[in-house]
Amino acid sequence: MENRIADIQSRLSAIGEELTDISVEVLRSAVEAGETKRPPLDKNLSQARRAVERAARALETDRRQLD
């Protein structure tokens, strides 16, 4: 079971990194388009990234409890 949890945690971390990459792309595109405000999509991506990171941390805590 610990291996499965570790695998899920790893995938969540990768998803968090992907969300960060997409957010950077969204911000870069907004700057290039001359936008002066943060795009709403970036807010949603940041919120999703934080939720995924919280989930990954929660699983890390659960794995330590299994030891």
Image (cartoon, rainbow, N blue to C red):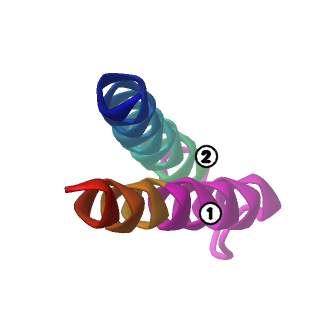
Farthest-out residue, bottom: 37
How many numbered circles does the render carry? 2
Q: Specify the segment rendered in magenta.
A: 31-55
Vertical placement of residue 32 versus 55, above or below: above
The x and y percentages for residue 19 are 51, 41
Quadrant of image for the C terminus: bottom left
Q: Which residue is mark 2?
A: 33
The x and y percentages for residue 48 are 67, 56
Give the residue drawn at x 35%, y 24%.
Answer: 7
**26 lies left or right of 45:** left
The first of marks 2 and 1 along the sequence is 2
Residue type at the position of mark 2: Ala
Farthest-out residue, front: 67
- Which secondary structure lies at badge 1? helix
Q: Quadrant of residue 37?
A: bottom right
Give the residue drawn at x 65%, y 58%.
Answer: 42
Please tell me how crowded label 2 is: few (under 14), some (14-19), or many (20+) other residues with Cα within 10 Å: few
Farthest-out residue, right: 40
The x and y percentages for residue 57 are 38, 64
Residue type at the position of mark 1: Ala
Quadrant of image for the N terminus: top left
User: How would you classify the magenta stretch by its main secondary structure?
Assistant: helix
Please tell me how crowded label 1 is: few (under 14), some (14-19), or many (20+) other residues with Cα within 10 Å: some
Most foreground residue, 31 or 61 = 61
**19 lies left or right of 3:** right
- Which secondary structure lies at badge 2? loop
Q: Which residue is mark 1?
A: 51
The image's mark for residue 14 is none
Residue 42 colored in magenta in the image:
yes
Give the residue drawn at x 61%, y 46%.
Answer: 33
Q: Quadrant of residue 35?
A: bottom right
The x and y percentages for residue 10 are 32, 32
